[in-house]
Image (spheres, grey):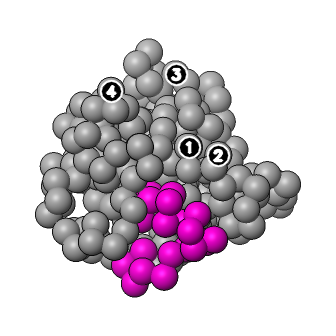
Amino acid sequence: MINWNLKRKAAVLVFSLMAILPATQAITPEELVYDQVSKYVSAQQAADISRNICDAAATYHVDPVFATAVFTTESHFDNTAVSGVGAIGIAQLMPDTAAYLNVNPYNVRENIFGGVKYLGQMMDRYKTWDKPFMYAAAAYNAGPGAVDRAGGVPHYAETMNYVQTVENTRQDIWRIAGMQANTGRMDESPVATTKVNAPVFPALKEWHENQTASAVSPSGATAMAQEKIGTASHTEHVLQRSGKTKNNDNTHLTSFAK
């Protein structure tokens, strides 16, 4: 005779264990971007910002995690942020730089696209160097002229701290997925060769639910969904730039002429 009461209790136990055991699945770069952005802004804002970062990264062939680490350090994804010298938004673009790039720095998507485009130029400039990500970050902060003259990260205290913060953030983002970030050299794989399953964190779970529940908008998410960007992480917002131009070649803060 079947003991239905016992079977019922067993079923309850199984479902209880399923509820508390961490789900596992491979995490994509897009999800990592969303998870990082969602630490600072609302879920809806994080979805929009991460989609824009990934769209721009696909357009300009930039690692979305690297761009996310830079923007974390620059503004914590606050597009209303304005530095002491007038750098604007998530990517902290100066008005003349935004004009050169033909973007409206007060528009979230255009601000992000401008910043990612500039990062792409710097990555291309230093792609044959030993640590392209670090030198691109240094150039974003101090200008490529300063990086070229130093033959690496310029010995400015702010720039060295900035580069270290970006790099730590970039490494941390990849570590969530159980991966080790590379240096950005052309002869390296974009990500670790062994991809492990990692826990689905609350923000990532929400990301999956949002992606499933809503249709992909033609303005941006389609490109992100169709193309997996497999290229290869906080301090207070960097507002100390007011004194940086005294000895730094701030190309992205002033102009692209240098």
Between disc 4 and disc 3, the foreground one is: 4
Mark 3 sits on what residue? 222
At x 49%, y 66%, the residue is 146
At x 37%, y 68%, the residue is 248
Rendered image: mark on residue 146: none
Mark 1 sits on what residue? 120
Mark 2 sits on what residue? 124
The kind of residue on which mark 2 rests is Asp
| Residue 211 or residue 185, whichever sits in front | 185
The kind of residue on which mark 3 rests is Thr
At x 48%, y 82%, the residue is 155
Tell me the distance, in whole angstroms, between the alpha carbons under discs 2 and 1.
6 Å
The kind of residue on which mark 4 rests is Asn
First in sequence: mark 4 vs mark 3: 4
Tell me the distance, in whole angstroms, between the alpha carbons under discs 2 and 3.
26 Å
- Is residue 15 visible from the viewing direction of this image? no
Do the numbered discs 4 and 1 sit on residues whose CB atoms are within 8 Å? no
Rendered image: mark on residue 102: 4
First in sequence: mark 2 vs mark 3: 2
The kind of residue on which mark 1 rests is Gly
